Image: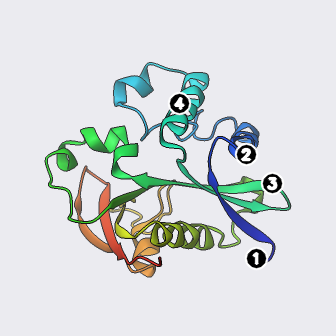
């Protein structure tokens, strides 16, 4: 699609993110993409306003929490990613918390979202490609994604992608970190 641009979610671009998520009532029951940024108890014990505040608090501490896809000055998509330290939920995951960190930076992609009026235009691919390009600009490293894989419908695209989608981008399956969540990885070289 022509006319797309990509910009990191920072405190300066928060109003774009806020407008996109307000339009969709905070997305997924008012998550505000705070699910992976908080512990399970921190997330479960707050409402949509608390999730929004928690996301902004993490953004304030880490300076950025993802990538916005923009068209005509309006955010139409968002991908949440960052280094492993950003994601409190993954740090506490039983399958991940005791694993040694790689000898290069570890990045994670947790959530993908496109405006409901912009779907079915294959916009997630350019959004994730912008994320991978940004990771390369910041030195590259190991990139992990965590799509769900359901036996009844293994190709279904969820809020965190699908296994076939990530495989088409060169990611490989590593293991399962839950009943349906698959850890996938790709090495991104530095473009500095």
Are the residues flagged by discs 2 and 3 in contact, CB closer than 8 Å?
yes
Label 1, label 3: how far apart the Cα atoms are: 15 Å
Q: Residue at x 53, y 67 (%)?
A: 134
Residue bearing the label numbered 3: 74
Mark earlier in primary sequence (1, 4): 1
* Residue at the far top in the pictured view: 45
Question: Left or right: where does residue 142 sit relative to residue 38?
Answer: left
Label 2, label 3: how far apart the Cα atoms are: 8 Å
> Dot 1 surroundings within 10 Å: few (below 14), some, or many (20 or more)?
few
Q: Residue at x 35, y 31 (%)?
A: 39
Label 2, label 1: how far apart the Cα atoms are: 19 Å
The percent coordinates of residue 85 (x first, y second) are: 35, 45
Q: Which color mode does the image show?
A: rainbow
Mark earlier in primary sequence (2, 4): 2
Q: Residue at x 53, y 66 (%)?
A: 131
Residue bearing the label numbered 1: 1
Dot 3: element: strand
Label 2, label 4: how far apart the Cα atoms are: 18 Å
Can I make out residue 9 in this image?
A: yes
Residue bearing the label numbered 4: 57
| 9 to 49, vertically: above or below | below
**Which quadrant of the structure image shows residue 87?**
top left
Mark earlier in primary sequence (2, 1): 1
Label 4, label 3: how far apart the Cα atoms are: 23 Å
């Amino acid at each position: 699609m022509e006319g797309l641009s990509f910009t990191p979610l920072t405190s300066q671009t928060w109003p774009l993110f806020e407008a996109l998520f307000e339009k969709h009532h905070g997305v997924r029951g008012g998550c505000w993409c705070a699910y992976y940024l908080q512990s399970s108890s921190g997330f479960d014990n707050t409402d949509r306003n608390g999730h929004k505040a928690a996301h902004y608090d993490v953004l304030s501490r880490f300076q950025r929490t993802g990538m916005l896809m923009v068209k005509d000055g309006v955010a139409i998509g968002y991908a949440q990613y960052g280094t492993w330290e950003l994601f409190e939920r993954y740090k506490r995951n039983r399958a991940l918390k005791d694993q040694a960190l790689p000898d290069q930076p570890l990045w994670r992609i947790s959530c993908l979202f496109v405006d409901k009026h912009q779907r079915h235009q294959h916009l997630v691919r350019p959004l994730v490609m912008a994320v991978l390009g940004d990771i390369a600009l910041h030195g590259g490293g190991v990139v992990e994604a965590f799509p769900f894989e359901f036996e009844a419908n293994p190709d279904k695209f969820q809020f965190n992608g699908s296994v076939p989608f990530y495989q088409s981008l060169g990611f490989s399956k590593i293991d399962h970190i839950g009943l349906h969540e698959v850890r996938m990885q790709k090495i991104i070289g530095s473009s500095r």
